[in-house]
Image (spheres, rainbow, N blue to C red):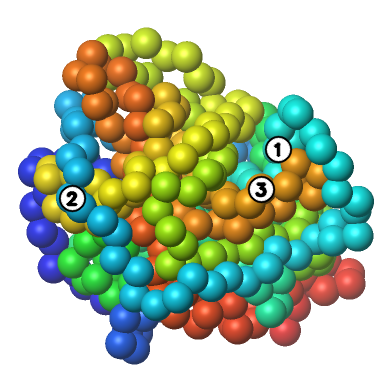
Amino acid sequence: MKRILLPAGGAVVATGLLAAGLAGAAQARGDLATDPMARDSAQASSVASFWAAAGGAALRSASAYTWDAKDVRKVVSKGGVNPDGGPDSAAPIGEERQPVAKVQNVNLPKTIGKVFFVDGSGKFRWCSATSVRSNYRNLVATAAHCVYDTDGDRDTLANWIFVPGYYQGKAPWGIYVGKQAFTHHDFDVYEDYDRDYAFVTVYNGIAFDGAKQVDRKEYQRFSGPKRSWGKRYYLLPAKDVGRLGDNVGGQGVSWNQPAGGQVRSFGYPAAPHPDGDRPYTGVTPKWCHGRTTAKAVGAPWLKIQEHVGLKCAVTPGHDGGPWLRDYSNSRRLGYVNGVTSTFADQDANDRIDHITSPYFDGETAAIYNAAKNVWSGKIVGRDGELYK
């Protein structure tokens, strides 16, 4: 779906490119907008092998999506939040049988990781994200600007994958290729950052075990993941590692919750503060803990009217990371009640000191409930062949 691009005070928020080889318009039903990503196992295999080639060189060379430092400003109070129904939630999955224990240190959730994509300039980028509960255990939650191309007149960003537990080019639980993106119609069409959240179904994880150089005939016969450079041909032995939720669990999701509640935010900050100080590397996840603002906050330069804020000094790269209510240290599970969308400098000292998230309401729940019921499937079969 081509967007009507609305100026946001010159803000540079995200860039992107339509996933390679994908065609077709987004579909909108009421508040829901859906967009295709990798349509079948062949396209998904190509995306996965793109990132895994050369020992994950593309993953290691990716950089955090970054905001223009001049667009980090002060958010303003807008009055109370407006639930559109009673509070509700969907429970998390994974590690349900572990005993509850009081733990002082924060155990990082297994569900978090990075989403990688190619932006409109061809640069390799990443944001933060988490696995969430779904009927097929195949769903990722992140910021919509980490899924949709808000800078170009196109739909989803190119070569989109999720890597839970990512570390220095390694994918300990496999690579999960995006199949279908779900967001609010107002973000998809009008880039309304009050709806800056997205849910993405992903194929089963795929793992690679090196590369095997072959001649052209063998390369042409093989139906699984493969890459060629010039006149050199390589097969990429691959295996299906199963569903995302079976491997790392999935956070719950909650909506219409009272503002001012305790949350923990998780993500991979990397960019410098506006003053140039760079306290984070983006290599390991960081977290913040506190109460969200009791009132909604707005960001006039992004036309935001109803976000909630959290005092937190993280920098971009944390984009898309989950805000978890009722987080259990022992189970490493909670309820996603927001995702990092914007960064603010409340005391005007050129240092980020707050982050904001869209308020999760009944319309958010409708998007989530539509996404959680969609099946995705496998990329490769038992012998590494493309799954059909």
Q: Would you call the spot at circle 1 few (<14 residues within 10 Å), some (14-19), or many (20 or more)?
A: some
Amino acid carrying label 2: it is Lys
Quarter of the picture containing the C terminus is bottom right
- Picture quadrant where residue 53 is located: top right
Left or right, 308 with reference to 55: left
> Residue 78 — which label?
2
- Residue sitting at x 12%, y 45%: 300
Which residue is nearer to you in this view: 373 or 159?
373
Q: Residue 128: x percent and y percent?
A: 52, 44
Up the image or down, 7 lies above or below 36; here it is above
Q: State the residue in front, 29 or 125.
A: 29
How busy is the neighbourhood of tag 2: few (under 14 within 10 Å), some, or many (20 plus)?
some
Image quadrant occupied by the N terminus = bottom left
- From the viewer's perspective, is 49 left or right of 349? right
The circle on residue 327 is 3
Question: Are the residues at dot 3 and dot 2 in contact (C-beta closer than 8 Å)?
Answer: no
> Residue type at mark 1?
Leu
Checking the image for residue 108, the label placed there is 1
Q: Nearer the viewer, mark 1 or mark 3?
A: 3
